[in-house]
Image (cartoon, rainbow, N blue to C red):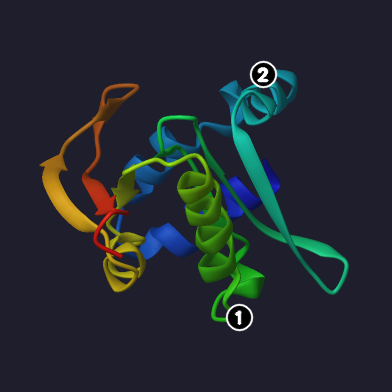
Amino acid sequence: MAIFLAAVTDTAAADYSPEQIQAWARPETRELSTWHAAMHARNSYVAIVDGEPAGFSDVDRFGYIDMMFVDPRFLGLGVARQLLAHVEAYARAGRLTELTANVSITARPFFERYGFTVEAKQHPVMIGVQLTNYAMKKNLLSN
């Protein structure tokens, strides 16, 4: 959970207001056991750099990527690229035809660089605060 919180509160702070960051991160309401159970329910991957967890991602059996976060200390080292490669390999091995994700403003350029396209701009509300993200999709049949 520490990587998620650092990524949201540090990396995404350039694209979201402090109020939006607090609504998204909600550290005081996140239960570690619930977090771990959710991670185990999906195909989850952790990237390790120099013996430290540097990022994580997951993908469900339908090709939905729920989370992909990189510790700000490891940005620019290809961590997200490697995580996405694992996710995509899982999807292809399962003969899935696409990957989908709800992607932050911050992460949108990364996902576009690796073949995802915006399907819709969205405005989810978290604890009464509106955020912006993008429903994105990558067609695996054409790649």
Task: Say which residue appears at 82% left-offset and 63% top-offset.
Answer: 52
Question: Residue 77 — which label?
Answer: 1
Task: Say which residue appears at 66% left-offset and 48% top-offset.
Answer: 45
Please give the residue where the numbered disc 2 appears in the rendered image. 34
- Say what amino acid the circle numbered 1 marks: Leu
SS at circle 1: loop
Q: Horizontal placement of 143 versus 40: left or right?
A: left
- Say what amino acid the circle numbered 2 marks: Thr
Identify whether 30 is placed above or below 57: above
Identify whether 56 is placed above or below 142: above
Is residue 9 among what the camera can see? Answer: no
**Residue 132: percent from the left, percent from the top?**
21, 44
**Residue 28: percent from the left, percent from the top?**
61, 27
Task: Say which residue appears at 71% left-offset and 27% top-offset.
Answer: 36
**Residue 69: percent from the left, percent from the top?**
54, 54
Q: Quadrant of the N terminus?
A: top right
Task: Say which residue appears at 25% left-offset and 40% top-offset.
Answer: 131
> In this view of the protein, which residue sits in the foreground, 91 or 52?
91
Q: Horizontal placement of 20 versus 41: left or right?
A: left
Query: Does label 2 or label 1 sit earlier along the sequence?
Result: 2
Q: Residues within 10 Å of mark 1 (few under 14, many from 20)?
A: few
Q: Quadrant of residue 106?
A: bottom left
Q: Horizontal placement of 63 versus 68: left or right?
A: left
- Distance from the alpha carbon under mark 2 to that under mark 1: 30 Å
State if disc 1 and disc 2 touch (CB < 8 Å).
Answer: no
> In this view of the protein, which residue sits in the foreground, 75 or 82?
82
Is residue 66 among what the camera can see? Answer: yes
Q: Residues within 10 Å of mark 2 (few under 14, many from 20)?
A: few
Q: Quadrant of residue 34?
A: top right
SS at circle 2: helix
Q: Quadrant of residue 112?
A: bottom left
Q: Quadrant of the C terminus?
A: bottom left
